[in-house]
Image (tube, rainbow, N blue to C red):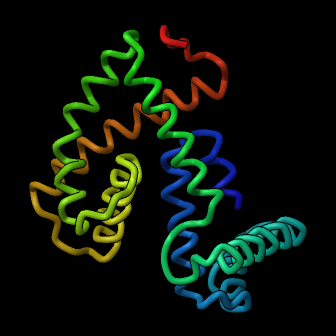
Amino acid sequence: MIIARKLRKENIVQYLLYMWQVEDLIRASRFDMENIRRQVIDKYDQPEETRQEIEQWYEELIDMMRSEGVKETGHIQLNNNIIIALTDLHLRLLKSPKEMVYSGLYYKTLPFIVQLRAKSGGKEVPELETCFSGLYGFLMLKMQAREISKETMEAIKQISLLLNLLAEKYHQDMKGELELENE
């Protein structure tokens, strides 16, 4: 919760990746709050009041995952809404003549997105979700100390550039500092 709050303010891309990781942690803990308390919450060096707040946050996420039917796979609507908001911004950026750098970066990234979609069995998901899934998969491979091919590294580098620029634009947009010509 502490990390999530900080990331949400600073970098929406890192926030979403973190939240996906939290969802997986909850799944790995079999939705057992006692296990999460022992493995996660007890490790925080925080006052008791903050630890209770963290515990409540995890309990609420568990409830959301259960009620939204994403116990095995998928993401809670809260996280899906971020993809929707980022996709909306992404499309607005692509339409704006002021955003040539963003458009150029997107078109340079597009072949990697197409490749990732092909590897995912052709599931129809939004382009940005494909980017996030690729980046998240890369992070999981890295955490497992698995070998990562040169091609994958190239794709991840390009996708990261696009998502980092999108995160900057999102932050500007949230502060009311993003002016697009077509709006």
| Quadrant showing the N terminus | bottom right
Query: Closest to the observer: 168 or 84?
Result: 84
Q: Quadrant of residue 151?
A: bottom left
Report the residue that reaches farthest toward the left.
150
The image shows residue 134, relative to residue 39, as above or below, that is: above
Tell me where residue 82 appears, x and y as whole percent: 57, 48
Query: Closest to the observer: 99 or 158?
Result: 99
Query: Closest to the observer: 31 or 114?
Result: 114
Tell me where residue 171 appears, x and y as whole percent: 58, 30
Q: Residue at x 63, y 46 (%)?
A: 8
Q: Is residue 75 left or right of residue 48?
A: left
Tell me where residue 124 appears, x and y as whole percent: 34, 58
Report the residue that reaches farthest toward the right.
49
| Quadrant showing the C terminus | top right
Q: Residue at x 51, y 35 (%)?
A: 88
Query: Closest to the observer: 179 or 114?
Result: 114
Q: Residue at x 85, y 73 (%)?
A: 52
The image shows residue 51, relative to residue 102, as above or below, that is: below
Tell me where residue 74 appears, x and y as whole percent: 50, 71
Q: How many marks?
A: 0
